[in-house]
Image (tube, helix red, strand yellow):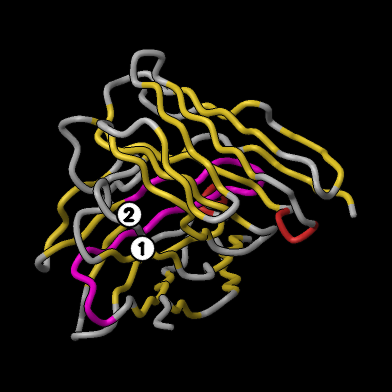
Amino acid sequence: SQQGEEDPQALSIQEGENATMNCSYKTSINNLQWYRQNSGRGLVHLILIRSNEREKHSGRLRVTLDTSKKSSSLLITASRAADTASYFCATSFSGGYQKVTFGTGTKLQVIP
Amino acid sequence: EPEVTQTPSHQVTQMGQEVILRCVPISNHLYFYWYRQILGQKVEFLVSFYNNEISEKSEIFDDQFSVERPDGSNFTLKIRSTKLEDSAMYFCASSVGPGGYNEQFFGPGTRLTVL
């Protein structure tokens, strides 16, 4: 299986602090995406990083990708209570085309 | 902003019954997907659909499942004879290009409860 495994499974921080979530995967990928899911709701796309990219920024989000270690990290800076959600990485593997495989997720709680 | 919509938001059915979950993807998208998420577990890929045919499917998507794009706007998932283990949140998604290379836009989901 080439699914992503997020680490940690749960993270609780104070508002204003930074939150870092990690994702590891097993096989070569085309791209890696990060999604957010608020409790009981649909998934919201955050950022896509291609296999030939190392770092990408979007607002308060910073994503890194290390293909040699088969890992990615998502950093949320200056967290807000509204960032409370589950965060998933999703990978599309080399040879795949449409399917993305979601990881197990990190449940982030930001305490006001 | 365009969005993917799904109906119903919650469906309760008896084991063995057929259910149809409906989705309206974003109008200019060409690729359509169904995922499911059993409570407390990860999101699992079921099937992708492009050019009026299934392009990829997972081992979960067995003969009990089928998908259809009956007209230019709807995309449906049918479960022929529901089982207790089919209880889950079902998400529809769509994308402009192939999902492995493009952002997939997800609907709010349909919660299916099989009794």
Residue B14 placement (x, y as % from top left): 57, 66
At 41% from the left edge and 76% from the top edge, which residue is drawn? Answer: B4
The secondary structure type at the circle numbered 1 is: loop
Work out whether mark 1 precedes mark 2 in sequence or the reverse, and give the earlier one. 2
Quarter that holds the N terminus of chain A: top left
Q: Relative to residue A8, is residue A96 drawn left or right?
A: left
Q: Residue B32 magenta-drawn? A: yes
Q: Nearer the viewer, residue A63 or A29?
A: A63
Q: Which residues are magenta?
A: B27-46
Residue A13 placement (x, y as % from top left): 83, 40
Mark 2 highlights which residue? B64
**Type of amino acid at the residue the image marks with label 1:** Arg
- Is circle 1 on the same chain as circle 2? yes
Q: Are marks 1 and 2 in contact (CB under 8 Å)?
A: yes
Classify mark 2: residues with Cα within 10 Å, few (<14), some (14-19) or many (20+).
few
Within the image, what quadrant is residue A56 found in? Answer: top left
At 88% from the left edge and 49% from the top edge, which residue is drawn? Answer: A111
Mark 1 highlights which residue? B80
